[in-house]
Image: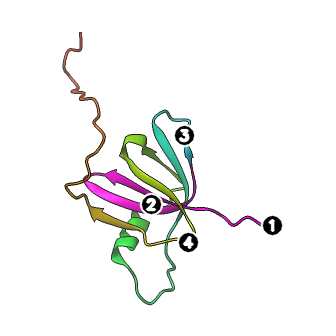
Amino acid sequence: MARTKSIYKIIFHNRGKIYEIHAKQVQHSALLGFVEVEGLIFGDKSAVLVDPCEEKLQAEFSGVKRTYIPIQAVLRIDEVDKQGTNKISPAGENVTPFPSPIFTPGRDQT
């Protein structure tokens, strides 16, 4: 029995917005605290209707072979049957990023 290729939907918080992307491979990274996402999948360029949000994502990730997302930014990772729409949406009030330590450069840490 032939196994179909998996597609993963990754939803993460980045610069005050919620990104939803699709990829062929997701795994933990050798870089501590990061999720490794490889083989980003974008919509068909030959389609009559072009989504400007997807074009913006495609331009942002053009030339990217593999991206590393901080684990605290990841909201959800799903294995899906087929690719949906990649999009960027504003973060609502119900999304709170995981707290991170406060570091202020230049302060005496002793």
Would you call the spot at circle 1 few (<14 residues within 10 Å), some (14-19), or many (20 or more)?
few
**Residue at x 47%, y 40% (from the top left corner):** 34
Q: Residues within 10 Å of mark 3 (few under 14, many from 20)?
A: some
The residue at the point 51 percent across, 85 percent down is: 46
Q: Nearer the viewer, mark 4 or mark 1?
A: 1
In the rendered structure, which amino acid carries the disc numbered 1? Met
CA separation in Å, label 1 and label 3: 30 Å
Mark pair 4, 1: CA separation: 19 Å
**Picture coordinates of residue 95, whole percent (x, y):** 26, 52
Instruction: Name the residue type under label 3.
Output: Ser
Disc 1 designates what residue? 1
Which disc, if any, is residue 48?
Answer: none
Dot 2 alpha-carbon crowd within 10 angstroms: few under 14, some 14 to 19, many 20 or more: few
Which of the two discs, 4 and 1, labels the residue nearer the N terminus?
1
Is 95 left or right of 2, judged from the image as shown? left
Judged from the image, the secondary structure of the residue bearing numbered disc 4 is loop
Select label 4 or label 3 by which is in front.
Answer: 4
Q: CA distance from mark 3 to mark 2?
A: 19 Å
Q: Which mark is residue 29?
A: 3
Nearest-to-viewer mark from 3 and 2: 3
Tell me which residue sits at (40%, 62%) in the image.
Answer: 20
In x, y percent, where is residue 79? 55, 60
Residue 13 falls within the magenta-colored stretch: yes
The mark lying in front, picked from 2 and 1, is 1
Q: Which label belongs to residue 61?
A: 2
Q: Which region shows up in magenta? A: 1-26
Amino acid at dot 2:
Phe
Q: Are marks 2 and 1 in contact (CB under 8 Å)?
A: no
Residue that carries the numbered disc 4 in the rendered image: 82
